Each structure stands twice: as C-alpha cells, then as structure tokens.
Image (spheres, rainbow, N blue to C red):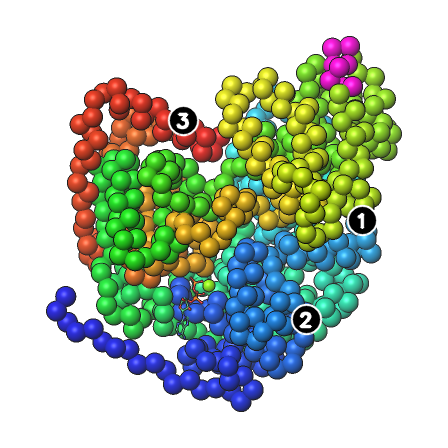
Amino acid sequence: MSEPRVYPARDREVAAAAGENVTAGLNVAQARAATHGAGPLLIVAGAGTGKTRTLVHRVAHLINTGIRPDRILLLTFTRRAAQEMLSRVERLVGGGGRTVHGGTFHGTAHRLLRRFGQRAGLGADFTVMDQADAEDLMQIARQALGLGDKKKRFPRKETLHDVYSRHVNTEIPVAALLGAEYPQFVEHEEAFGRVFADYTARKQDRNLLDYDDLLLFWAMLVEGPLASEIGALYDHVLVDEYQDTNLLQARILKGMVAAHGNITVVGDDAQSIYGFRGATVRNILDFPRNFPGTTLVTLEENYRSTQPILDVSNTLISRAEERFTKNLYTRRTGGDAAWLVTAHDEQAQTRFVVDRILELHEDGIPLREMAVLFRAGYMSADLEIELAARRVPFEKWGGLKFLEAAHVKDVLAFLRVLENPRDEVSWYRLLMLLPGIGETTARHAIEHLQGAAWAITAFAEFPAPARARSAHTALAALLEELRFAGSARTGKGGRHAGGTATPEDGGSRDRGLGREVAAIRRLYDNILRERYDRVEPRLADLDQLQVIASGYPDRAAFLTALALEPPQSTQDLGFGSDSEDDSLVLSTAHSAKGREWDAVFVIWAVDGWFPMARALGDDEQVEEERRLMYVALTRARNHLAVSYPLNVYDTRRGADYSLDQLSRFLDRGVRAGMQRVVVEAAPVTDAPAAADAAIVDLRALVKARFSSN
Ligand code: ATP
Ligand code: MG
C-alpha cells in the first residue's frame, strides 16, 4: 500500500472531579456513561465500541463515589466474563472491586433463591436440573398421562420442553407458540397444558427447579411481598449484552431497581443471537419506556478492528432487515484486507488454517491471541485432529459434549439421588442401568421409594425380582456407604469450601468428592464395560470427572456448579489448568461473543453450515444467523480470514461429495472488500490409497464423537 499511515489523534480526556483515574482511557461519550449519576442508563452501540470497557469503568466510578462494592450487582452472560470484568475493576480501584456481586442471571437467581426461597415456599435444599434432566422429567409426565402411545403422533419430550421453556421465557401463550412453530401440534394444545401441569407438580413434589424456574421464581420474588427486601440488596444493577436477555429478565431487572431506578444496561441489537432461546431485542428498544427518565448514550467509534475488517463487517450487517445501531468507524486505518479463502475440501481448509496460524505465530502473535470460529461445535473435529498431530495446543469453547455424554450423566445420576433422594429422573436413569432391571421394575422401585417418603434407606427394602437381586444388593450397599460421605453438612469426607488440600488427601483424584466418584465407579465401570463397545475414551472421561469432582468440597456445590455453569472450555475442566499456557482458541460463534483476538479465522462459511441448514426456511432465523456471522467477523483486531471448502464430504446428508455454495452472507458487496486467496492443493492427495483410507477412518471416528446425536 502506498498511502501513508495516519497517526490517529485521541480525544482529549475530560475527567470528572471525583473520578479522574476512572475516565482515563475513555472517550467523551464513554466517560459520560461511566460517570453517569443516578437513574436508568442505556448504552446502545455496535461491536468493539467499548461497551464492556465502559461498564467496567462505571463500576469503578461507583465504588470511587462511595457506593459499597457489595451493593453493586453486575450481570453478564457467563461467569467467566463477570470474573474478567471484576478483575479489571480491581485494577482501577484496588481490592474493593473483589466484593462486587458479579455473575450470570441464573447464578444470581440461584444464590437469591437459596437465601430467600424458603420464605417463598421453596424447599430448602432444592436441586437444579439441567436441560436434559428437564426433558426427561417431561417424558415421565408425558407417559404418566398416557400420551406416549402410538395412536396419534404426540410431540417428543424435546419439543414439549422447548414449548414450555419458550412459553415461560417469552410469555407468549402456548397456543400462539404452537401456531407459529409447531402447527402440526396445534390440535394437542390442551394436552400440552396437561403435561405442563403434571411436570410442574412433579418438580414441586421432588424439590427440583429447572433453569426457567430460576428466572421465574426470581421474577416472582421481586414482584411479591419480599420485593422491597430483595430490591434493597443493591444500590446499582449493571447488565452487559442486554440484547440477549428475555422478557422475564427485563421483569426481574424492573423489580430489582424499582426503589431507585439505578440500572445501566449495554447492548447491540445487531449482535442479538439468542432469539432461539427466547431472548428479544425488544428489551433494548423498550428500555426507555420501561425505565422512565432513561439517559441514552450511543457510541460509534470502533477501537477493536482495522478499517478493512470493519468495512467487511459493516457491509455484511447493512443487509440486515432491521437495525438500530449505526455503522461504525475506526481510526485504525492500516491493515490487510480480510481474506476470503477457497479450499478444495475440508482437509485443505484445515491445512490452510494451521499453516497460517503457525506463520502468524512465527511473526510474533501468541497462540492465545488467535481464534478459529465456526457455527457449531462439531465443525472443528478435523481441525482438532490436525492441531493435535502438529502439536499446536488449543482449547475449545462451546459445543462441549462432555457433560452430555451418557456415561458422564450416569455417574452424575448416582450423585444426584444421594443429594436429593426425591430426584425421580436420576433414580430412573440409574435403575435402568442395572442388570435385571427394566422399565416396570424401575417404576415399582420408584413407587416404593415414594411410599417411604423418599428415604434413601428405603431402597434396600425394595423387594427386587430375582433376576435383579444381585444388582439391587450392590446398589443398596453403595448408597449406604455414600449416604453420609461427601456431604459438607456432616463434616465427614468433605473439606471446607475453598480450603487448601492437606497432605492426607492422597492422590489428587481421590480428594473431596473425588473419593465418592471413585466409589461409584467401583460399581459403574463394570456396567459401562458391558454397555459400550469403545470403553477406553469413556473411562478417560470418567477419570476426568473424578479429577473435577475432587476440586469440590461437597456434592451440592459440585452439582450446582455443573448445572449452572457448565464448563465452557476444556480449560475449565482442568486440562492444562495453567491459564498462562499459550494455546489457540477454537470456539463456536456463540461462545465468542464479547471477545476479541488479533487474528480470527471463520471456517465453514458454506450455505447450510453458516447459516445452518435448519435456519433456511425461516426469515427471522436467517437474520439471526446473519447477526451471528457479524459477531464472528467483528471479533478480529488485525487479521481476518473467512474460509470455505468447495467440496464437502457430508455424512449427514448421506451424499458422498457435494458441491457447496459460499455462505449467502458473503454476497458480492461484502466480497468486494475482501482479498481472494486460494489454497494450493495439498500434496497429501497424491499419497497412496491405503494411507488415504486410514486418515479418513480416524477422522470419521472423531466426527462421530462430536456429532449431535
Ligand atoms: P462487543 O460488542 O464485541 O462486546 P464492546 O463494545 O463491549 O464490544 P469492548 O470489548 O469494551 O467493546 O472494547 C473493544 C476494544 O476496544 C477493547 O480492546 C477495548 O480495550 C478497546 N477500547 C474501547 N474503548 C477504548 C478507548 N476509549 N480507547 C482505547 N481503546 C478502547
Ligand atoms: Mg462487550
């Protein structure tokens, strides 16, 4: 490039008297938002304009003006995001930042319900079910009502749960939801109602809460008699990524700040990507109406990306049907155009990504400053193999199937019934594992437990049929052994939360709750060997589970953490726990939200992959996919490459090879701002056939492990 690079002028900082240090490093509009006084504040701005940074500085400012840190609530999309923001607050104002309450909506709901739930009629030691458990309970309700028979096609448990969850989160009547999304089931509307009623009663009986309940009960708390007490907990509430909240969350916020109106939210409608879960961009648009007296701040300068990268993202999002935030500008005028990379097939794409990453690494970019993004977790399988083979360390965010794996859930079911003997779903799961126990016996056993008021000791007295007797005896013995172990309340086996390991803890896998998992595995590993063909990787998963469990003082802490904050990355699971490790990030586009890297690769920019095929029939879903692509592109600071294989080996469609199209989002206008790159054919294609076959086998194996079913 021949044009000289322009050295950008900075805004002159205008520091408010009391907050000199907190406005340093903010532009005028950001500083105005950070030092805003009382009352509702809405910051609407595009990607990389410093929304999150402004929020951090605002928290610091509030502390500087004398607000007690523990009277500030900062709500974020992941716990990790809250932790990072609060450590930045600490850097600005010192140790005080540590006591700010930060976390997700669900995590905060859980904390408040443990504290206030009993006074609102909730059992003291409720258990939180994850989505899969909630679906299983829905299945139990469906069967109990006799709706499982084959006469008429009745919706599956996943559909039932989806409709239920959307109904709770969006407040749209069930009939309207069915009409719009499942017209084939409209005739069953009344039956949906019966299943939901049964499901709700079961949850209450069994002392279980699902994810949606956490929000629902929180909303009810702040709208009921305890409202003023709960509202009085915080003087200020701040929310990042507001575009991805739902109506229930808006109601919660309204209740939380009813007394003082001190609420700050930041968001970008162009990055709203959780509509499929009931989030609504209306929350941003209606904010001024919901919170009268709102001060609005907009930001238009992007500090993250170079001009060429921003140009491509701006053009891509300018095609969106509806949009409120404006196009962004940047003063980072230098830089390479974004690359549009064509590869012959998936392997060539993989080879390109790894080669280019190594090249940039040699130029001095640390691996952790680079990320590869994709639409869905399984799309990185091939890349993961290649990275492992070439010894490039990486961690993966999102799309993690570890906790969804059947064998992991099996072991967790043991822990769950020990923690909450009323947990019918987990009883069912573990009983069905036992040799000699089928559906009928499992049902009888559960009825027996229910008849004994869910005392776990009652299981030993269950008259098991002859063929199940030895399994029954073994399980009863295990339950008896573990009844008191691992529970902090008894003081046996558990360590103090956050306590340090003592030398007598022995091997790291057998500390704390790890010991309990080890005991369960003495029974379960044999069952696993019977049930599965490929045993080794599953046993390795259980080893890993044992390591994670050993880090927790008791069952309750562990199960809650797994349900509320499922590990986001392999790093969260304890692999390479040294966070200073330099490793590349592989992430789904969803999990990349809010982050940034020097170099970003977006792979599989193929129609049907990104956008996903199942979104294509629905205009609104296509728009959400477009925003998701916008999120992906706007993560890049200096280098952006979007790649797509020309030939796609697609097992899911049953075809061998199909010629696929470039993603519709990269239309001619978008491409005009990009630099075309063609990957040279890989020498590997000349290798002998036998070698080819071996490679394909291995890849297929791994792919099977990552595929969604
Ligand atoms: P997203 O929409 O992706 O969440 P965002 O609006 O939250 O983005 P930030 O992540 O806060 O943006 O900021 C993007 C980058 O710009 C960060 O590296 C941040 O440090 C930098 N930045 C923001 N404001 C300024 C500023 N006034 N001066 C210098 N750098 C800034
Ligand atoms: Mg942000």
Q: Which residue lies under the disc numbered 3?
A: 701
Q: Which residue lies under the disc numbered 1?
A: 124
Q: Is 299 left or right of 486, judged from the image as shown?
A: left
Instruction: Pick whichever of labels 1 and 2 is earlier in the sequence.
Output: 2
Q: What's the residue at 36%, 29% (across, down)?
A: 699
Q: How many marks?
A: 3
Q: Residue 552: x percent and y percent?
A: 67, 46
Q: Secondary structure at mark 3?
A: helix
Front residue of this view, candidates 193 and 199? 199
Q: Secondary structure at mark 2?
A: helix
Q: Report if the beta carbon of the residue with label 2 is closer than 8 angstroms to ligand 2.
A: no
Task: Give the Cα separation between the discs numbered 1 and 3.
Answer: 45 Å
Task: Give the Cα separation between the discs numbered 1 and 2.
Answer: 25 Å
> How would you rate the neighbour count of disc 1 (Cα within 10 Å): few for under 14, some for 14-19, many for 20 or more?
some
Give the quarter of the figure containing the N terminus. bottom left
- In the depicted structure, whether residue 645 falls above or below residue 79: above
Range of residues picked out in magenta: 466-473
Ligand 1 is located in which of the four quadrants?
Answer: bottom left
The type of residue carrying mark 1 is Ala
Q: What's the residue at 71%, 17% (across, down)?
A: 437
Report the disc number at residue 71: 2
The type of residue carrying mark 2 is Arg
- Image quadrant assignment for residue 528: top right
Front residue of this view, candidates 575 and 238? 575
